[in-house]
Image: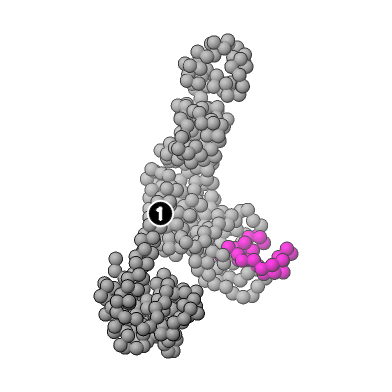
Amino acid sequence: MKANVLLVDDEQNILRTMKICLESIGLDVTAVSKPDEALKAASQNQYDIAFFDLKMYPIDGLQLMAEVKKITPNIIVVIVTAHGSVDTAVQAIKQGAYDYLQKPFDFQELQHFAQKVYDHFHLQKELKNLQEQLYQYEAAEDIITDDPRMLSLENLAREVADTSISILIQGESGTGKELFAKYIHRLSQRKDSPFMTVNCAALSESLLESELFGHVKGAFTGAVRDRQGRFEVADSGTVFLDEISEIPTATQAKLLRFLQSREFERVGDTQTMKVDVRFIAATNRDIKQELAAGNFRDDLYYRIDGVSIKLPPLRDRPDDIPLLIKHFVKKFAGDSPPEFDAEAFSLLTNYRWPGNVRQLENVIERAVLLAHGRKIEVYHLPEEIQNQESKRLLSLEALEKEHIARVIHETSTVEEASGILGIDPATLWRKRKKYGL
């Protein structure tokens, strides 16, 4: 792994010596004698390591470091000084330098020092690669699907993740709109910056505006101090507006202006602020109907709909239901997941799931809790799932098994259960053995 080095020193002899020395250990070196040449080089090329002399004109090494880090934030900078002191070293490191090197130094000393800096660069690169792999793994694990349409949407999300284009995610409640938004954020260069969510349907117009843009003290009753909005807090990150179709018309106009310029004012303030955020919106409504009804601005729609992701409901991807059941059982039961009664599993896989994936997750969490580590039976499921009319034409034997299992679950002794069932304890024991209860 080669490293590109930017070397700046206004003493030509030292510049030549350092260049030869650094190249002798395999570094690619660009050597310049003036700070303005260094800034030009940094704007045109990607450098991994920099050695800046402290005493230069018209700006010194610390000032040059600050300017270069604006261009390449992760560059490893070493300050070279003939005026070495503890104060100088502390100041340089506080301002972002990796280390400092004191003149005079001999050839071998510089080689050893440069090798240490290179080793640090190499470790940083390896750590970044491992973090990238972890982010990819975590993000991929979130979306559980074998459905071709979902896989296509997942691929689209990956393709647009590292762009700045606005994204509109549409789908019924519980289909995973926020999950997709987080997936996009974690695959982007913004992944280390904030991901902020705002549920537009949960806030009144005045509170929503304050939540988005912030406010200053005294802007309205109860504004006892300045408050940052979500856009300001999420600077360099991602803002996800859920249920964007619920935004009032007046706030829509302010949001449009923000999306056009990324500029805004806090409520009650006149100072314009500018941020860099990725914008993702979601809605469970038919946005075209909202446009036709005049509830949503056309110009705002065209601004947020840079890329459209339409998530299908769970009932339209039945092959994903068994995968999701397995995923949620492991999530809530750990490494010792309970087995499923065949009839209970059949009811889950054939249910229409009006609440989509969110409803399925809640049902599995409930079933795992009620089963206490034992087999998940029909009676562990909510009544609306048990009572599916088209799926309840069971044999007498299946009905008997289900009824006995329910009675056993709701009683504390064999005698109590056999009394309710109207059979003696020995008969109940035989039936439990027969049905594996």
Give the tally of numbered discs: 1
Q: Residue at x 37, y 76 (%)?
A: 50
Q: Residue at x 41, y 70 (%)?
A: 74
Query: Vertically, is 127 above or below 382?
Result: below
> Could you tell me residue 143's position as x and y percent?
43, 47
Which quarter of the figure has residue 207?
bottom right
Label 1 SS:
helix
Query: Vertically, is 404 above or below 311?
Result: above
> Could you tell me residue 381's position as x and y percent?
54, 31
Label 1 Cα crowd, 10 Å radius (few <14 / some 14-19 / many 20+): few
Q: Nearer the viewer, residue 289 or 21?
A: 21
Query: Is 156 positioned to the left or the right of 261 in the image?
Result: left
- The quarter of the picture where the N terminus appears is bottom left
Q: Residue at x 42, y 48 (%)?
A: 141
Q: Nearer the viewer, residue 316 or 229?
A: 229
> Could you tell me residue 108's position as x and y percent?
29, 76
In reply to whether residue 178 is colored magenta, the answer given is: no
Three-letter code, disc 1: Leu
Q: Please indicate, yes or no, whether residue 351 appears anywhere in the rendered image.
A: yes
Give the magenta-colored segment's residue range: 205-231
Residue on which disc 1 sits: 134
Colouring scheme applied when the structure was drawn: one colour
Outermost residue toward the right? 221
Q: Nearer the viewer, residue 155 or 437?
A: 437
Q: Please indicate, yes or no, whether residue 301 appears anywhere in the rendered image.
A: no
Q: Residue at x 49, y 37 (%)?
A: 333
Q: Nearer the viewer, residue 25 or 31?
A: 25
> Could you tell me residue 419's position as x and y percent?
62, 13
